[in-house]
Amino acid sequence: MTDGLRQSMSSLHTWGGLLVGWILYFIFLTGTLGYFDTEIDRWMRPELPLRSSAISAEETVERGLIRLNDVAPAAERWRVELAHRGNDTGAHISWRTGRARDGAPGVFGYEPLEEAGTAARRTGGGQLLYQMHYRLHYLDENDAAWIVGFCAMSMLVTILSGVICHKRIFRDFFTFRPRKGARSWLDAHNVLGVLALPFHIMITYSGLVFFMFMYMPYVLDEVYRLDETSQLRFFDNAYPSEPEYPRRSGAQAPLAPIEPILLASAAHGGQLVAVAIHNPGDATARIVVTRAPNTVRSAPQRLTYDGVTGEPIEAPGAAPAAQSAYDALIGLHEGLFAGPFLRWLYFVSGLMGSGMIATGLVLWTVKRGSRQTSGSCVHAVGRLNAVTIIGLPIGIAAYFWANRLLPVDFEHRATWEAHTLFGSWAFTLIHAVMRPVKRAWIELPAVASALFFLLPLINALTTDRHLGVTLPHDGLPGDWALAGFDLTALAVGLIFGATAWYLRVRQGHALSETESASLPVMRPRVKVLR
Amino acid sequence: MQRLRQLATILGTPAQLIASRVVAAILGGYIFASIVALLLARILPVPAADALMVALLMSFLLYALAVLWVFAARTASLAWLGLALPALLFGVTAWAIGR
């Protein structure tokens, strides 16, 4: 490899990364929180019953069906949806009377399955937090997708050029030299980047694939230019819609008992998420059991049973290979198939990605800050770095505080939770502009530490879902979704506290010694692209 | 030296040349990737819907490689040339097959 190539790749890596680094950090961090969206949802709805006192999924389905038989005996379709990842409204029943196909508008009904009085507070929850990583919250959905796409494409290029310009990728994997200024930041950047490199590439590429029909419209247009019906056929093949169910025959027939069907469906693996019944009470009844994906293919499994005999009805065949590849990439990105251990691995990998971006941004200023000629541009980047890297977690902590402190009956509380996130983030920008950069780097982590560390306390003061209740006690099993949230907040608080303390001590050192002795100056490598 | 300066005024200042590469990377790379994806969608020996899917899945890799090429090329003109010629060739082929 020539030096020229390495240097041009290095420039591309540096400037391409800097340009989109701040938005990418936002995308990575909020996206990473999405791997625990259900747990965050649960924590943000403290009115829901504790898991240890909750009834089983099968029991909930049976209760739901009994209730449906009472409220809508003549419905076209019944559905019992359980609380699960991706369902932000909690367990509920819904029904439809009248057929949309016949031109009649159809009447829809909905009822939460939680007991009366436990209706949860209005909140954006973990869902809103996770959606921010591709909707960017205040922007139009399409605009956001294009911005995120541009950033993801830059990320892909930055990763590839980073790998190319890297001299000793495997040696650096085992290298960390602390307290060496720019060298240490470079080592940290390398370790975070290389250790989770497959994850970074996978998550970036599969993120692009999510919107590929939108990003690459010309190919689709051109291939199907002559024939619009085949374009429709493509989407029909790619995204099969719900199959048609037989029409009501009018002959009455009792519904098969649901318990053996749920037992039989368990053999297909995955978690039970919903049960739908078409034409209940009719001879043509169909029972459709939906189970969460238990493989990386993202689509949930729909298992159809005859509603009278309870016999399984043949499922549609496997998707073609290209479709499977697409599904696999989407499934890998969402990680819905992952069990607790793998989900933590996703979470940690996502944090490493955020850390890689953060260290890369810091490295840009550290390298230039150690030069004699560092100007206002470097200081501006340094401030923006502090505001992004530490300010965003502060905003997220404020989002959780708002969930506990805004009045429960405040109508727009979900909206204002989000406003609190971005408002306090904007506040950190004012702070960083008013204060010297080095002070901001100590004070912002200290604020973040306090906000996260006090979160379990605020939770205990405002709800009865605190650690004293959610951890296992008096022989009762714990509610780990809730306890895990509080414990994670404590850990994050400790980490930010340690960061603030470490930076304070180190800056004290740096002031007492000469600048050049504590920060070895990196020889600037400049190459003007012709 | 005089000659080098003359050459520079013809080709553009360093800032202009970098801007030229950025445009080549973002816009040129996108068009290049779209054209190669279109060709792949037409020539892959699998059913049409599958070929399109594979082509679109590949398109981001093609785009990334095109961007890397633009910045790896020795000069900005070479960067443009290295995108435009293959794009023209693949584009004409794809057009001829699609007629």
Image (spheres, coloured by chain):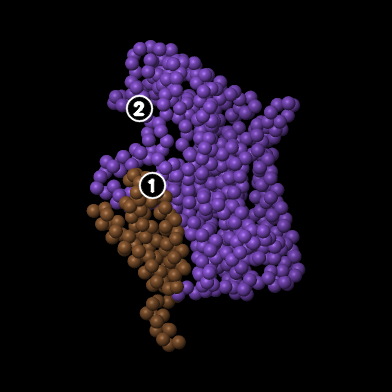
Q: How many numbered badges does the structure rendering display?
A: 2
Residue A499 versus residue A262 in the image, above or below? below
Q: Colour of chain A?
A: purple
Q: Chain of mark 2?
A: A
Which quadrant does the N terminus of chain B fall into?
bottom left
- Is the residue marked by circle 2 packed among few (<14), some (14-19), or many (20+) residues within 10 Å? few
Chain of the residue under label 1: B
- Mark 2 highlights which residue? A244
Residue B27 visible here: no
Chain B tint in image = brown
Q: As displayed, is residue A237 above or below residue B38?
A: above
Mark 2 → mark 1, Cα distance in angstroms = 26 Å
Tell me which residue sits at (44%, 60%) in the image.
B65
Please say if B44 is above or below A249: below
Q: Which residue type does callout 1 highlight?
A: Met
Give coordinates of residue A189: x percent, y percent: 61, 59
Helix, strand, or loop for circle 2?
A: loop
Residue mark closest to the camera, 2 vs 1 = 1
- A85 horizontally vs A508: left or right: left
For residue B53, which numbered disc appears in the image?
1
Q: Which sits in the foreground, A205 or A106?
A: A205
In the figure, residue A406 lies in which quadrant? top right
Q: Nearer the viewer, residue A380 or A352?
A: A352
Question: Residue B95 appears at what percent x and percent y?
Answer: 27, 56
> In what element is the residue under mark 1?
helix
Q: Nearer the viewer, residue A441 or A292?
A: A292
Q: Residue at x 65, y 34 (%)?
A: A480
Q: Residue, x 31% and y 63% (percent of image)?
A: B88
Q: Position of residue B6 (x, y in %)?
A: 39, 84
